[in-house]
Image: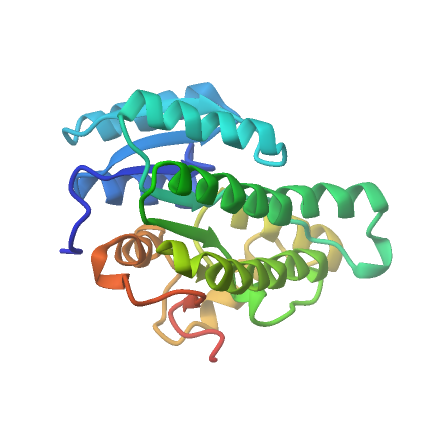
Amino acid sequence: MPKGLNNKVALITGAGQGIGRGIALRLAQEGVHIALVDLHQEKLNAVQQEIEALGVKATTFIADIADPIQISEAIAHTESSLNGFDIMINNAGIAQVKALAEVTPSEFNQIMNVNVGGVLWGIQAAANKFKQRQQQGKIINACSIAGHEGFALLGVYSATKFAVRALTQAAAKEYASAGITVNSYCPGVVGTDMWVEIDQRFAEITGASVGETYKKYVDGIALGRAETPDDVAALVAFLASEDANYITGQSILTDGGMVYR
C-alpha cells in the first residue's frame, strides 16, 4: 500500500470516465478525498457516488481546463469543500487522429489548448496554491507513449504529449525548492472510450475494419493484453504517495511493453 495517502486531498481533471475515473477510485481506496473535475455533471455525479461508497469525501466541479481562471476556481472549490489540497492530477485531454497534411489551424489550436494549455494552467494554479498554503505538494500530469515516440496519424497529439514531458521537466526544476514534485504517467493502449474513438478514426482514414487498429496495437504489447485504467491508477497512486518523494521530473511509461526508453 502506498504510504502517506490517507486523508490527503486530490483534484483530478477529466475524472468523469476512463483513466480519470480509475485514478479517482484507486486514490479513494487509499483514503484520499477527491475533487472530480470534468465537463459533464451526470458523469461526475456517478463517479462521486462510487467514491463516497468507499468511505471518503468527494466533490464535483465543472471546468474547462483550457481556461486558467476555471482551473484556479476548481482548486479553490477543492480547498474549501474538502478542507485541503495536496495532489493535482492533470489528467484531462483529447485525441486527434489526422494526417499532418490535413490538420487545420482550428484543430491544432484546440488540441494544444486542452492537452498543453490544460497541463500548464493546472501546474501553475496548483503550485500557486501549494505555496499559498505553505506546504509541499504533488503535481502529476497525463503524458503518453506518444510523448516518447511520434506516431503516424497521431502527429499533433504526439506533439502535445512531448510538450507535456517538457513542461513536467521544467516545472520539476522550477518548483523543487518549494518541495513540489512534478511527474507524468505515460499510458499505452488503454481500453477506454478514447481508444474507441481513435480506432474509429483510423478505420475511416485507412480503410481498416473497425477494431483492426486497436487489435494491431494490442498484439504488439509484450505483456499480451490491453491496458486498463487500474494499471495507470496504480502508478499514479505511487507517484502521489510518500514512496515517490524523491522522484521528480519523470515521465514514466506504463504500457505493458510497447515503447522502451
* Percent position of residue 78, x then y: 37, 27
Q: Against 257, is 132 above or below?
A: above
Residue 182 visible somewhere in the drawing: no
Q: Which residue is more in the foreground, 221 or 207?
A: 221
In the visual, does 121 lie left or right of 138? right
> Residue at coordinates 44% horizontally, 23% vertically from top-left?
61
Residue 211, picture quadrant: bottom right
- In the image, 49 versus 238, the foreground residue is 238
Q: Position of residue 150 (x, y in %)?
A: 65, 69
Q: Is residue 148 above or below residue 121?
A: below
Q: Is residue 35 left or right of residue 66?
A: left
Query: What residue is shown at x 47% (from left), y 37% (from top)?
Result: 14
Q: How is the image coloured?
A: rainbow
> So how many labels did they put on this image?
0
Question: For the point 24% across and 54% down, which residue is it?
Answer: 241
Extreme-bottom residue of the structure: 261
Spot occupied by residue 117 in the image (x, y as percentages of width and height): 63, 44
Give percent across and percent down for residue 222.
Answer: 39, 76
**Image-based side of 110 in relation to 61, left or right:** right
In the image, 130: left or right of 29? right
Name the residue rendered at 48%, 80% in the picture. 261
Q: Is residue 257 above or below residue 85?
A: below
Residue 85 visible in the picture: yes
**The N terminus lies in quadrant:** bottom left
